[in-house]
Every structure is written in structure tokens, then in C-alpha cells.
């Protein structure tokens, strides 16, 4: 596959990852809110208040997770895969002799046609090392030298 098409597929993979995660969180919030409503009908005293407080905490945590996912959605919306640069930046596809990295969000491994590409955040240890580098540069990660073969 040509790199621009590859980057398009990788960006779609990351967007699907975020959409799936967001859907899970929204479903969890709906379950929590349903439980809160049913807890509201209970009159079990202290046990009722403890259960309700726990559900409120769960709802707050789910709300924070939702905010984080929305930040990732915003970040993905800012990635311009058509922009080309000789330096590694957000949206770059970095090819090394052993691995490929797409700098976007931490979304795991995208496997297609026998090629594995790691979708990583620029904030990860390897992402920070790759940022700003160019073809031919070498970075050391986990005591291993990694040469950058290509940057798309």
C-alpha cells in the first residue's frame, strides 16, 4: 500500500478505536444512571446511601473517562495525514527496519497485509524519542538502536 492510503487507514483505525471506547463509556453511564434511579426508590437506610454514593463515584469516573475520550476525538480531528514533512510529527508514519509507528493516539496495533503498525501517542516514551527526527536518524529505545528508514 502507498503510505498516504496507509495513513488514511491508520487514522480510521484510531477513530474506530475511540468511537468504540466512547460507546462503551456511554453504555456504562446509562447503566449507572439506571441504577441510580432504582436506588432512589429504595428505603434501605445507610445501605441505600452507601450504594448511592458508590454509584455517584462510578458516574463521576465515567464522566472523566468520557472527557478523555472526547479529547482524543479532538486530537484525531487535528491530524492532517495529507501534510508531508521530513520530520516526525503528529500524523507521521515512521518506518524502521523492524516496526512501523503512526504518531496519533495510543490505540494498539493495526495489522494489515502482514504489516503491523503501532498507533502511538507522541507522549509515549518511543513517541517522544521519534518526534522531530528524520529519515536516517537513529534513536535508542530500551537499549536498542532503531534507525528511521522512512517518514511519511
Image: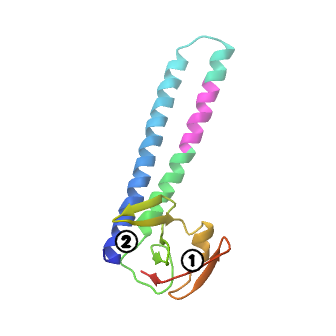
- Residue 66 lies, in percent from the top left, at 51, 47
| Colouring style | rainbow
So how many labels did they put on this image? 2
Q: Quadrant of residue 77?
A: bottom left
| Above/below status of 14 relative to 85 | above
Q: Which residues are magenta?
A: 52-63
| Above/below status of 28 relative to 102 | above
Name the residue at 44% across, 58% down. Answer: 73
- Is 11 left, or right, of 97 in this rendering? left
Disc 2 designates what residue? 7
Disc 1 designates what residue? 130
| Above/below status of 150 relative to 25 | below
| Above/below status of 42 relative to 76 | above
Q: Nearer the viewer, residue 49 or 97?
A: 97
Our reading of the magenta stretch's main secondary structure is helix
- Residue 99 lies, in percent from the top left, at 49, 71
Helix, strand or loop at label 2? It is helix
Amino acid at each position: 500500500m502507498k503510505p498516504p492510503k496507509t495513513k488514511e487507514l491508520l487514522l480510521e483505525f484510531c477513530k474506530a478505536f475511540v468511537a468504540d471506547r466512547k460507546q462503551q463509556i456511554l453504555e456504562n453511564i446509562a447503566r449507572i444512571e439506571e441504577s441510580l434511579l432504582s436506588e432512589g426508590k429504595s428505603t434501605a437506610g445507610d445501605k441505600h446511601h452507601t450504594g448511592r454514593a458508590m454509584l455517584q463515584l462510578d458516574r463521576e469516573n465515567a464522566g472523566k473517562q468520557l472527557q478523555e475520550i472526547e479529547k482524543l476525538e479532538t486530537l484525531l480531528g487535528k491530524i492532517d495525514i495529507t501534510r508531508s514533512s521530513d520530520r516526525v510529527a503528529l500524523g507521521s508514519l515512521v518506518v524502521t527496519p523492524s516496526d512501523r509507528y503512526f504518531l496519533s493516539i495510543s490505540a494498539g496495533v493495526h495489522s494489515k497485509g502482514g504489516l503491523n503498525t503501532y498507533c502511538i501517542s507522541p507522549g509515549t516514551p518511543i513517541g517522544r524519542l521519534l518526534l522531530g527526527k528524520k529519515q536516517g536518524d537513529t534513536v535508542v529505545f530500551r537499549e536498542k538502536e532503531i534507525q528511521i528508514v522512512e517518514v511519511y
